[in-house]
Amino acid sequence: MTVTDCRALEGLVPAEAGAGSPTVHHLYVHIPFCLRKCPYCAFYSVPFSGELVDRYVEMLVKEMEMVVPALAPKTVYFGGGTPSLLSEKHFEKLAAVFQRAGWTDIGEWTVEANPATLTLDKARFLRQLGVNRVSLGVQSLDETVLNRLGRVHTRADALRSFDILRAAGFTNINIDLMFAVPGQTLSAWEKVLEEALALGSEHLSAYELNYEQDTPFFEEFGAGKSESEEDLGCEMYELLLGATAARGFVQYEVSNFARDTLDGTGAPPAFACRHNISYWRGRWYYGLGPSAASYVMGVRYANFDDLGRYCRVLANGHRPIATAERLSPLARAGETAAFGLRMSVGWSFEEFRRVTGFELRDEWADEIADFVEGGYAEMTSSRFKLTPKGMLFADLVGEQFLRPEY
């Protein structure tokens, strides 16, 4: 059931306070400002403006205070947009909400940063504030690729920003990379991988470029890729797997690699992103800011993807929720199965039953049998997971586990 009528949302969205209200342990905060919109990006963003940022932070504090009673965050993630564009004053106002709420047990607080927006003073300030993980949007160390992607930073900016984070005391840094960019060659990708891994970060995220609708790249290159482009993308991905393994990284999700080893129990590597794991394991989370999504007590809802409307609604004392949808238990379980299979450990049958209330081997018996027979997955007495071949097609495999939303 999907609801878009704001008058009907109040009864569908879970209460944020009072007896019986849920306790949510994961918080996402969307910072929608960018110096320039990248032509491949489909995330909601607006041009940076000091006046707009001031107004936005004021309203974001209001929204945050509305959900404080139901939150005890173990992970916090500031994404964007470009969160590192916020000033120290803005971060202080948001952190003050954390302090008033008594959120003293945040195990992982990530802030996304673009290389052109970091200074040593700002990095030190964030570390002192309690931020303990930074995701650095490098995307490439090849100037030609950076220009093709429309990035505002240079190779030198990226290398300097990594050094700044180390100097500021950060010991948990993620580097974001992109591959299969138009015009990018296999040898150029290999060189970028070698240089990026040599930096010694604790985490690496590497994503194949997708042509998202309503982006300039979609208009320029079309909805689909040619067969040769798909083959090259697979070669680049195989190169990624080999290079990360050689440098001591463990692949714990299709596009994510972290240092430290798996311990055989299904636990992720020590430097895996705990916040993103909450999505893949079907846990509840709040999303704040324009366009941000939340999932609480079986209800999925999203904020207005318009900064002006977002601010006006909050100024009038209401939450800025645009749509809400209550999934059936089986539909929720199907989504959880699909997302969880993106992780290299897949699902233990016991964990899946505990999270969803369903038995994976019963409801999805035919799908499991087909994928095991095709070499895309493997099953033991306690676990079902994708093989390396299956990880190449994780999205297509996951789609087969979805169920109708009724």
Image (cartoon, rainbow, N blue to C red):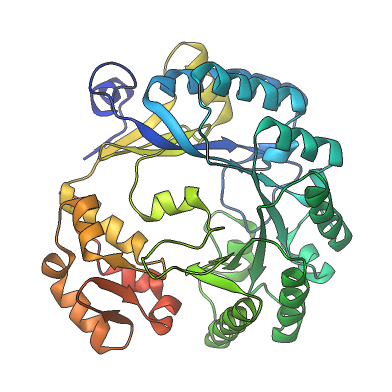
In the rendered image, the vertical position of residue 75 relative to residue 61, given as above or below = below
- Residue 128 in the image: state x and y as whole percent: 72, 33
Number of residue marks: 0
Q: In this view, does 30 lie to the left or right of 344?
A: right
Query: Quick check: 217 left or right of 286?
Result: right
Decide if residue 198 is on the left or right side of residue 80: right
Camera-side residue of 117 and 310? 117
The residue positioned 51% from the left and 26% from the top of the image is: 103
- Quick one: which residue is furthest to the left in this view? 362
The answer to which of 150 and 75 lies nearer the viewer is 75
The N terminus lies in which quarter of the figure? top left
- Residue 107 in picture, x, y percent from top left: 53, 41
Does residue 226 sit above or below 142 in this rendering? below
Is any part of residue 239 visible from this angle? yes
Q: In this view, does 244 lie above or below 10?
A: below
Nearer the observer, 294 or 170? 170
Displayed quadrant of residue 149: bottom right
Q: Position of residue 367 (x, y in %)?
A: 20, 75
Depth check: 392 or 131 in front?
Answer: 131
What residue is at 33 percent from the left and 24 percent from the top? 6
Residue 152 visible in the shown view: no
Q: Which residue is drawn at 77% across and 33% down?
A: 125
Q: Position of residue 141 (x, y in %)?
A: 79, 67
Residue at (29, 29) in percent of width and height: 22
Residue farthest top in this picture: 316
Quarter of image, res 260: bottom right
